[in-house]
Image (tube, rainbow, N blue to C red):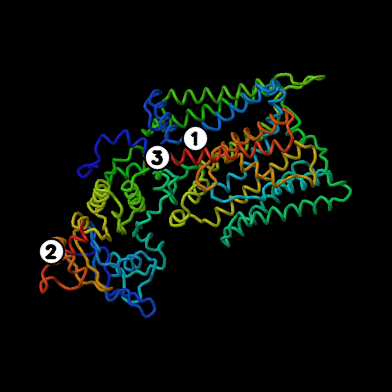
Amino acid sequence: MTSVNQEPTSQEPVDVVTSPDASADLLANNMGDYLRIVGRRIRSGESGALPVVVGLIVIVIIFQVKNSLFLSAGNLVNLMAQSAFIITLGMAEIFVLLLGDIDLAAGYTAACGAVIALWMLALNDPWWAAVLAALAACAAYGALQGIIIARLGLPSFVVTLAGQLGLSGVLLYLVNATGSIGVGGVISLHNSTINDIEGGQLSPTATWIVMIVIGVLAAVFLFYGDFRRRSAGLVAAPVSVTLLKGIAVIGGCIIVAAIANQNRGRAIVLEGMPWGVLVVLAILFLWTMLLGRTKFGRYIYAIGGNAEAARRAGVGIVRIRTIAFALCGLTAGITGIIYASYLGSISTNVNGGQNVLNAVAAAVIGGTSLFGGRGKMLNAVLGGLVVGVIYNGLELLGLSAAAQLMWTALVLLAAVIVDRVTRRTANVR
Amino acid sequence: MNDAEPLLRLRGIGKNFGPVRALTDINLDIPAGQVTALVGDNGAGKSTMIKTISGIWEPSHGELIWQGKAVHFHSPKDATNAGIATVYQDLALCDNLDIVQNMLLGHEVTKAGLLDEITMEKTAKKTLADLRVTTVRNIRQPVGSLSGGQRQAVAVAKAVMLDARLVIMDEPTAALGVSQTALVLDTIKQLSSRGIAVLVISHNLTDVFAVADRIAVLYLGRLAAVGPASDYSTSSAVHWMTTGTAPGAKAGVPQNAEGVNP
């Protein structure tokens, strides 16, 4: 302020601490500054993705010490396939978690979508028609839930709990209705395209090309964004930081490709990246753009942050919430197809209730808030990998399902506690 | 009291809630480029009055004359579209969104369907600079990390961005510290110096005397007094607020002045 400002200059450094949310990207002038600010943010509780990444590394080290097969290429690729449907269901949940809502029915939405798709495939419909029909049905169901919740102002927990019960019934009904196709409550998958999502892989050459192209595109995207900010005279991250991030993205892609391209077959040669990884990356990109770069995404965050403020700003809350639930249903439908591809069939025994809780756990472990307004699609990837690693590792150690469930519960609890404790430190001013 | 063409004139405004007369026959001019302070004891009708102006309630009697024409606001949106922005005490900000995102909420700029962050950031930056809000370190920090005064400044800037001609502020300095209050008062002065009319409700007479060009006193739903701020002293303002009559018969109420004015 000009004349009336009485804030002493000695408050300047304190200011950074009182505003821990301020991203280091935009406050730093150079790499040293950047690291200092990141350090300060971690101490003040705004650690971002750091706890998940550190936690993931710790868990991986523990499993590797216990069983040297854990970090083998074969197991890591298996892990990618195994985590894919947890990750996509986590992304589905993030749409509604950002609003402060939850969709407990999503696991069974996915299962019902899978039944619709596999039923149509068994009737010799083309794969794309089966997928479209399943996704449309799932999105429509999500929209229905959204309309009930948003129009009538009912708590999403109760409405979607009813949805979970109802859809588990619908699942039984649908499988029974298929008659001779679903004998014994199981519909098997006999379509090579859908099978290939989790069961097929790109050729090693294609894997290299695709992953390097993705990495370079992502890095260029990152660079171009910062370049535009800089040339518009706005604050942007230091060039060195952008450079480092770009290198990290490309490096990550190369590592994934290198792992996937090792021969992991015993009798026959088995190499290349599963198609599922590409599917997950494509959804991640699409939904990240939707949340981060469109009005719709902005309004989701606004409603999750302060619904009354959003309403006064002219945001159509009922419409946005309904669309969010529809997108949650749609993404759950995609999950159902990936899940069916992973299992090679879909049955009435699908535990949709547990799947959805794993998905919510993945989103929360990754850093999405259960109370709305905070989170992004990448959280589901990180958290989904943590959940996937735990299941995979404990299975590898030969632990029972009982132990797997309890360990996942402990990790989720730890994630929520870390979140709450760091946040509390951050709020003490 | 009368300028050439006041931005907003209230003519015989009355508001009844059933048998309760919350406002009776209010005649008040709100000129552009000046800060009008609306003061009064609890229950004097201050809130009812700003809600009537900002379109939340329609008046039972009388009319609003906005820029020379009689207007009827059926909703807050009508008032906003006409150029009346109201900054309520709760500020209506999303703590999880940054300053730019809050200032442009509901009025985002898009290019080919995608948000045009650069244009939005420039617009927000310019508005804040025009209001001389310079204590904000980074325009991209979440509003939740700002101090109370900075939040108020962002809320005002948001109102100004919508091309408001009249900004109504409800208790803008309540619960703010000394330096934060100074920041808000300075923002109010900047608004009026840009030709915008400001209507401020406040309990704090120090703040009122610091920024107001004109003071209107409400007493039990009636306009007890209105005039240039220089016509009042703290004790005379308190006398008007507490009794609704001109000081003189019982000259000065210093104890009350101390109480109202910590």
In the picture shown, does residue A100 fall above or below A236? below
Give coordinates of residue B53: x percent, y percent: 33, 66
Pinpoint the chain carrying mark 1.
A
The three-letter code of the residue at mark 2 reads: Asp
Give coordinates of residue A376: x percent, y percent: 54, 40
Badge 2, how many Cα within 10 Å: few under 14, some, many 20+?
Answer: few
Residue, x 36% and y 61% (percent of image)?
Answer: B82
Q: Secondary structure at mark 2?
A: helix
User: Which residue is label 1 attached to?
Assistant: A48
Q: Which labelled disc corresponds to residue B141? A: 3
Asked if residue B3 shows in the view, the reply is: no
Q: Which labelled disc corresponds to residue A357? A: none
The three-letter code of the residue at mark 3 reads: Gln
Query: Is B94 positioned to the left or the right of A7 in the image?
Result: right
Quarter of the rendering occupied by the N terminus of chain A: top left
Pinpoint the chain carrying mark 3.
B
Tell me whether circle 1 and circle 2 mark residues in contact (CB < 8 Å). no
Q: CA distance from mark 1 to mark 2?
A: 56 Å
Viewer-side residue, A280 vs B261: B261
Residue, x 26% and y 55% (percent of image)?
Answer: B196
Viewer-side residue, B117 vs A56: A56
User: Are the residues flagged by discs 1 and 2 from a single subunit?
Assistant: no
Query: Is B71 positioned to the left or the right of A308 in the image?
Result: left
User: Which residue is label 2 attached to?
Assistant: B231
Which residue ends up furthest to the bottom in the rendered image? B19
Asked if residue B9 shows in the view, the reply is: yes
